[in-house]
Structure formats: C-alpha cells, structure tokens
Image: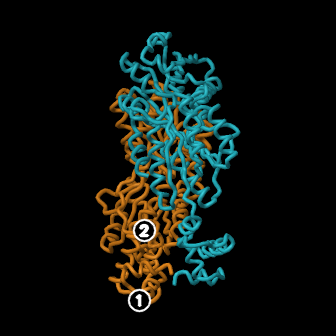
Chain colours: A cyan, B orange
C-alpha cells in the first residue's frame, strides 16, 4: 500500500503510519517525528495535511481590526484579504474569527482585547490602533505565548511575529515629492489631518513628518501650513481654512482625502493639487473627477492576507517568518487606478 | 491502508488504486477516471500529485524570450520569474527549457521558433517581439494544438491561452500626466524612441501614442517633438537634439531611459524632467541621482511567473485561465523604489 515505503524507512509498522495519517489512536511523539521526518525527506506531499491532522490541533486565529462603515470603507479591504486567506487554509482545520472595533474609540478597542484574551486563541492578527491600549494587550499575549501579527501600523519594541504595512514616513516623503513636482513654486502647501483627536491613532503623524522633512530638505522656502480638523468639524471647514484659497497651491491630506475633495469640489477646485491616501470608493470618485490628483496606496487586502498566512505558517508548519514586510508605496492616479484595482482583486 | 476508502467508494481493487497513485502497470482510462473522481469528491489532497503521476505525462514547457546583456538587463527579471515558477512545479514532473533570442535581430527570433517547433513542447511562453515572425509561429502552434502564453506584449487576433503584460497605451497616458504635472508650462516636450529600427518591436509605439493623446486632449498648446534614435547612434546624441536644451522642459523615453540620463548627466541636467520605463540597474542609478524623475514599471518577474503557472494549470489541471491579465502601471521614484524592489524580490 501507499504507506509501506514510509513504514519501511521509518522502521515502524504500517499500522502506526496509518494512525498518524488518519489521526486514529495514540502515537508517541518520537514515532510521529520519525514518520514526519521520512515524509519530509521523501518529499511526500501529503505530509503537510497529514501532519496537521495528526497533531489534532485545530488552530484558531482571531483578527482584531476596525469595522468599516459607509463613511469609512478602508477596512473593508483587509477583511476581504482575511476571508480569502481563511478559505484557503480551512482544509488544514484552521478557523478564523473576527473581533471588530470602532477606530475612533479607544474604549471599543480595549473591550475587544479583553474578549480576545478570554477566548485563548492560537494567534492574533491586529491593527494596533491605540498605542497605549495595544501595548498593554500585546504584553499579555507575550505572557500567554500567543503569537501576533501587526498590519497597517506597528508598535515599537513589541515581540510581534511579523508586520505587514507601509513605511509611513517614507510615504509622506513620496507625497511631498509629488507635491513639489505638481505645484506652482509660489503658494502655500497645506497639510490636513482629519479626525486624529487621539494623538496616537494611525500613522498620520509619521506621514506628516515625512512630508515636512522632504520640503525642509529640498525647498525650505515654500510655506507649509498644518491644519488639524476633528471628526466633528468636518462639515464646517470654511472657518478652518483661514488662508485665502488663491494662495493655496496644494493640499496633502494625511487621511480621508475625499472630505477635502468634496469641499474643494463645492468651492471650485482651481489649480490646487490634492494628494491623499488609499483607494476607497469615496476617494476614487474624486480621483476620477480630477479633484484628487494622487493617492498613495498600501495593498490593504494583501497586508491582511499575508498576515493570516504568517500566523498559519508559523503555528502549523513552524516556518520562519520575516518580521518586517513593507508594502510598496503605490502611486495611483486617474490614469492607472483601474488596472491596479483589477490586478488586486484578481490575485 | 490509506487507499482502502477510495477503493471501496470507487469499487475497484486496492491494488488498482495503488497502481494509479504509483504509476505502476496499466489502468484503464475509465477506471482511472473513477478513482480520480472519488479522490476529487472526498477532497483527498494527494489527488493532484497522483493524477499527474498517473497520467504519465511529464509536461515540457519552452520559454522564448530575449536574452539579457550587461547593456540591457531588463530580461533578467522575467527569467528569474520563470526559474522561480519552475522550481515550484518541478514536483509535478513539469520541465521548463529556455530558447533565448537577440531582441534586436528578427532572424534570431525566427531561428529559435524553428527550434521550439522541432522540440514538440506541451506549452510555450513567449514574448512576441517581432509581430510578423511571431504571427507565423503561433499559427503553427495553433495547428499543432500547443497552448501558448504571451508576456510583455501581445499579438492582435492570436489564440493565445493568456497574456500577462501592461496596457502600453495607458502607460503612455500616465507618463504624460506625470510629465504635464512636473513640467513648466513653457518649453518643448521631447519623446525619444531608442533602438526601434524595427517598427514592430516592443510596445514603444503605443507608449508614444498614449503620451501624445494625453497632451492633445489636455494641453494641445504644449509643443511635442519626436526623436527616433537608432541603436547605432546612441553615442552621438548631440547632433540629434536639434532644439536648444534651454527650451526643453521634459523628455519621455519610451525605452532605455538610462541612455538619455547619461547624456543629460554629462551635460548638466538642469530642470529637464525625465520619465522612462523599467526598474533596471542602469535606470536605478540615474533614479537615485535624481536625473530620472519617474519610471513606469510592469512587474516583469511576475508576468513570467504567472505565465508559467497559466500553462501549468491549463495543461496539468485543465483549469480555466483568464485570457487578459493586465499588470498595474507602477510609478517608481527615488523615494519609493527600494520598498517596491524589496517587495518584488521577497514575494
């Protein structure tokens, strides 16, 4: 039968090999290792499935990411990436569950971390939105020896298995390069931070820093103006834009560019260059209209997809995982976003 | 043993199942189909390997792409993609061989097509460089019922299984958008075609058309000047650039931007915006120096990698293959090319 070569090489009974593969009855760890080793050496493909089935472990992964809303669709894409990965690894007995929080409420994040801990998962994928609360959480995961993967942003000095995301500082530098190229050399550049009441959410601060650094290094004479707009004030932007429109040559939105775009669209955009982040449906509308000129993107589907695979490979196959996995800084315009989206959705 | 459940369901002897899986002795087509069906239904993972081994078919694929040289490294990347795919599918008994031609000599391409035909492969991956010669070739493949996949560019009205590449016209539009954004509104824009003696090689013509179309639609008043430079004349560019440098605000190189960059670098670049294609080492040197401002890229490794997989999936598993697979139009600058390369090489 199929098992006999393995039985012969591993020097165990065919019945034992059968027990390992079919997960029937007890086999000593030593014997199982022997059999799996032989399977590995002979490059016998079913060994992976067999190993998982034999181990009787049905790993459970939990994802702790924000929920998406009609107003903020960004987090739909990572969820799609997770679901895609989940389907692919279901055959290995891995289950994935979701714990979705409100990205504007640290208390919501905190509550969900407690739920996750009481659930004793085998691995956690998370967007560490609120750094204080996230730090407390991952310290507990460390103690419980539960591996975790960051997507979107990361915490400094955490023992995360892996990180999938963008270098936010460099993405700010890139936005500045595009801005410098696209703008009249006169006029003020405005950096707009929307809905960042909580100093530590997102990586918008790093984006801003990268942007400023580029201008200071390259064209220190161009005036930069920073505007912080709270989530509540977005419908009342007129009073906030204190500088006359005619003096503004470009706007860099560290998040939610569509809100600025809507405002500019209503007022008549003129020559103002608008650069933002992420290929959400809202942003696409204004990219198509030519109100948003450039969007910098970060493959949110792929971040989450790869994050789940990192946990899966680590837990099930004990594979080595690269700790830092930077996504490319993709530049999207009206001309190239369709091909980009098609490629992302079909792969 | 492992085979018994299949034997029971398929109503054949264990010995027969064993013969199928281990490719020993004869099994009728009907019986084999029965066994494979049961394997499929029971979601028995080794079925794929078993099916290939049982079919006794060891598919042979041939790749017909240009060889790369120290002066033109572009085609190294597709070769890397092919080798990566080759390693992954070697377990299925698939072998891949290479037939590399000189991208500047139609005769070299033609000779290699004759070699490929006399080799009777099961599938062909090709860059259809010279349209007349490539058309003749694929007509013969059609007659022989040998499936073929295009990468890099495609022929109109061919029966290719699949195509992996960029929309060249739209990439020209994108280059024009970047150019329009980056240039002073005065000054001439020069389009440079290098080494395109053979009207049909590359997709440089479509790039040029896309570029022109964008300018005609958006800013018809900006003067465009087209310069065709033969491969032999590249060391004698001064006499070719008839317009005074001071009047040039931007140069669009439909290929080999590094040659223009070297020329500009020696002369002192000034404010001329330079946009080209492909993240080759030569181009990267000048991107880092700030002589090349933007490069539009097309994932050459991935094109070839996916091309091989398309043939493999089609031949071995009879999977449905998408005919048109457009790569995104990636925009690379000094600020973001490192993250892009790192991502490409690690995935």
Number of numbered discs on residues: 2
The residues tagged by marks 2 and 1 sit, at their Cα atoms, a distance apart of 25 Å
- Residue named by callout 2: B43
Mark in the foreground, 2 or 1: 2
For residue B295, above or below residue B104: above
Residue toward you, A200 or A1: A1
Q: Residues within 10 Å of mark 1 (few under 14, many from 20)?
A: few
Residue toward you, A230 or B295: A230
Residue toward you, A312 or B259: A312
Residue drawn at x 48%, y 48% is A82
Q: Position of residue A312 (x, y in %)?
A: 56, 55
For residue B263, above or below residue A1: above
Q: Residues within 10 Å of mark 2 (few under 14, many from 20)?
A: few
Chain to which mark 1 belongs = B
Dot 1: element: loop
Q: Can the viewer see residue A214 in this picture? A: no
- Residue named by callout 1: B26
């Amino acid at each position: 039968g199929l098992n006999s070569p393995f039985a012969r090489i591993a020097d165990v009974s065919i019945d034992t090999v059968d027990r390992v593969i079919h997960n029937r009855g007890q086999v000593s760890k030593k014997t199982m290792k022997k059999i799996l080793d032989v399977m590995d050496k002979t490059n016998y493909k079913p060994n992976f499935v067999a190993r998982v089935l034999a181990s009787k472990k049905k790993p459970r992964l939990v994802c702790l990411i924000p929920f998406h809303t009609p107003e903020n669709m960004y987090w739909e894409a990572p969820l799609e990436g997770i679901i895609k990965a989940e389907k692919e690894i279901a055959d290995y007995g891995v289950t994935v569950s979701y714990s979705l929080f409100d990205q504007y409420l640290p208390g919501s994040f905190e509550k969900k971390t407690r739920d996750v801990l009481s659930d004793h998962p085998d691995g956690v994928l998370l967007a560490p939105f609120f750094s204080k609360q996230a730090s407390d959480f991952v310290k507990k995961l460390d103690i419980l020896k539960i591996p975790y993967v960051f997507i979107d942003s990361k915490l400094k000095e955490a023992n995360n298995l892996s990180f999938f995301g963008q270098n936010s500082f460099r993405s700010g530098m890139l936005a500045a390069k595009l801005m410098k190229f696209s703008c009249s050399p006169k006029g003020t550049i405005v950096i707009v931070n929307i809905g960042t009441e909580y100093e530590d959410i997102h990586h918008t601060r790093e984006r801003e820093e990268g942007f400023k650094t580029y201008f200071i290094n390259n064209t220190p004479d161009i005036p930069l103006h920073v505007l912080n707009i709270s989530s509540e004030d977005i419908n009342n932007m007129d009073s906030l834009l204190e500088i006359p429109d005619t003096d503004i040559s470009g706007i860099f939105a560290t998040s939610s560019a569509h809100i600025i775009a809507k405002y500019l669209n209503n007022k008549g955009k003129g020559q103002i260059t608008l650069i933002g982040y992420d290929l959400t449906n809202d942003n696409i509308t204004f990219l198509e209209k030519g109100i948003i000129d450039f969007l910098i993107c970060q493959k949110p589907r792929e971040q989450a997809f790869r994050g789940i695979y990192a946990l899966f490979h680590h837990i099930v196959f004990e594979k080595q995982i690269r700790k830092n996995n930077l996504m490319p800084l993709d530049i999207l315009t009206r001309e190239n976003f369709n091909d980009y989206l098609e490629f992302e959705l079909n792969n």
